[in-house]
Image (spheres, coloured by chain):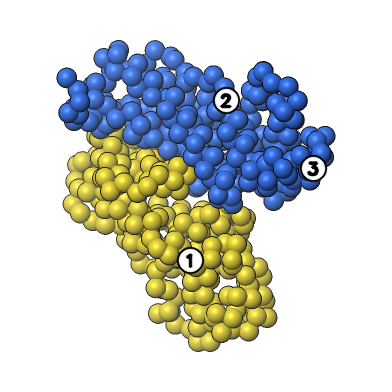
Chain colours: A blue, B yellow
Amino acid sequence: MTPEAPGPEGTRPTPTRRRPGGRTARIRTQVLDAVRAELGEHGYDGLSMDAVAARAGVHRTTVYRRWGDVGGLLADVLDAASDDDWRPPDTGSLEGDLAALNQEIQAALIAQPPIVAALIAASFRSEKAAHAQQRLWEDRYARCEIIVSRAVRRGELPPHTDARRLLIAATAPLYHQLVLLRTPPDPHLPGHAARTAALAAAASAFAEPPSASDT
Amino acid sequence: MTPEAPGPEGTRPTPTRRRPGGRTARIRTQVLDAVRAELGEHGYDGLSMDAVAARAGVHRTTVYRRWGDVGGLLADVLDAASDDDWRPPDTGSLEGDLAALNQEIQAALIAQPPIVAALIAASFRSEKAAHAQQRLWEDRYARCEIIVSRAVRRGELPPHTDARRLLIAATAPLYHQLVLLRTPPDPHLPGHAARTAALAAAASAFAEPPSASDT
């Protein structure tokens, strides 16, 4: 997932930049770049509408009118992060895909400046940021479901596999260790967590009964 | 883990109450009770030294002198939570123990008032609370290692099993879903996550090579 991970995002070099759009799109790019930079340098507590406006070189009334408050800025940074063409890694095996995915998540969570980590922290401060963070994770996990469907096609997994549950099992230890337990990054963790989920999947841990709509 | 979980804690009816100790211990009990009550009602943003002092019926200068700031109060609530005799559930099987543990964690994370959830959120605001939360989780996970050693004794797991990695795999999905992804509680999740970890463990996902110090 590069900095984007099913993790939060925001470290990407502004995918909005390539969009069509004139002055409005340009202002958004400048402002969101400024939010990321301020957040990376000062964290949530140092983030202010005025500092963002000054850094972006945009009039503060424009920033207030369009984003309302710091929560609105953070939410837009998070929403902008799913505005890309990110696809999960395709390595040819379930365990390989999950390990590569976890490497991207770990890299994003420990990146400097800690923008992804700061966005997650901000989601405990602002309802708007919390909802945007939820939307972003939903988008990332939905895109990752192809990892499971490819494994099903290759015959690595039974057809009725709960993709979301498998993806959560594979990625949750990364977030738990790095975001909540705050343990130092362990270079083996991405691979270990991937292998654990792949072994559990092979033992039918994520098998679902066929639903009535299936033929 | 009852409200205590390897999760954060604080909802317990003040284990400090039974301690020996005179006025100093009594004041601590009153103040920490007040912190939990204020946190449950108003969250971190509504927590103030003065409101805690007033609620506890303790002079504010005492609270400032002894706890310093809101971070100090939160850290002491978290430290007090490990001052109990909590033991993980003993159901007779690895999967049963993990499922019962996960039930306790889920119950703590969705409890009302949301004291455990508020303490986790506070750990993103206060360095002192973050460190105390880390100490509490470390204490809880260390106590849970007996789940794995019992399973090894029963022959359910190989002797060289990485207990911590197994416990993280079993419990991480609960925290990930409820604390970060903020999905509605799923009554099947505690059992599913336990079963996933137990299946992975049976497939040697957490096996460690024997260390040099072993005979």
Q: Residue at x 46, y 53 (%)?
A: B138
Left/right of residue A123 with respect to residue B82 in the rendered view: right
The image quadrant where one finds the C terminus of chain A is top left
N-terminal label among 3 and 2? 3
Is disc 1 placed on a helix, strand or loop?
A: helix
Q: Residues within 10 Å of mark 2 (few under 14, many from 20)?
A: some
Amino acid beneath label 1? Gly
Please state the chain letter of the residue tagged with numbered disc 1 in the rendered image. Answer: B
> Residue A130 in the image: x percent, y percent?
53, 45
Label disc, if present, on residue A122 of the rendered structure: none
Which residue matches tag 1?
Answer: B40
Check contact, mark 3 vs mark 2: CB within 8 A. Answer: no
> Residue A13 in the image: x percent, y percent?
67, 24
Q: Residue furthest bottom?
A: B22
Amino acid beneath label 2? Asp
* Cα distance between the residues tagged 3 and 2: 25 Å
For marks 3 and 2, give the one nearer the viewer.
3
Q: Residue at x 65, y 68 (%)?
A: B69
Q: Residues within 10 Å of mark 1 (few under 14, many from 20)?
A: many
* Cα distance between the residues tagged 2 and 1: 37 Å
Is disc 2 placed on a helix, strand or loop?
A: loop
Q: Residues within 10 Å of mark 3 (few under 14, many from 20)?
A: some
Figure label count: 3
* Cα distance between the residues tagged 3 and 1: 37 Å
Amino acid beneath label 3? Arg
- Residues at marks 3 and 1 on the same chain: no
Which residue matches tag 3?
Answer: A60
Which residue matches tag 2?
Answer: A83
Quarter of the image holding residue A74? top right
Check contact, mark 2 vs mark 1: CB within 8 A. Answer: no
In the figure, B134 relative to B208: above or below?
below
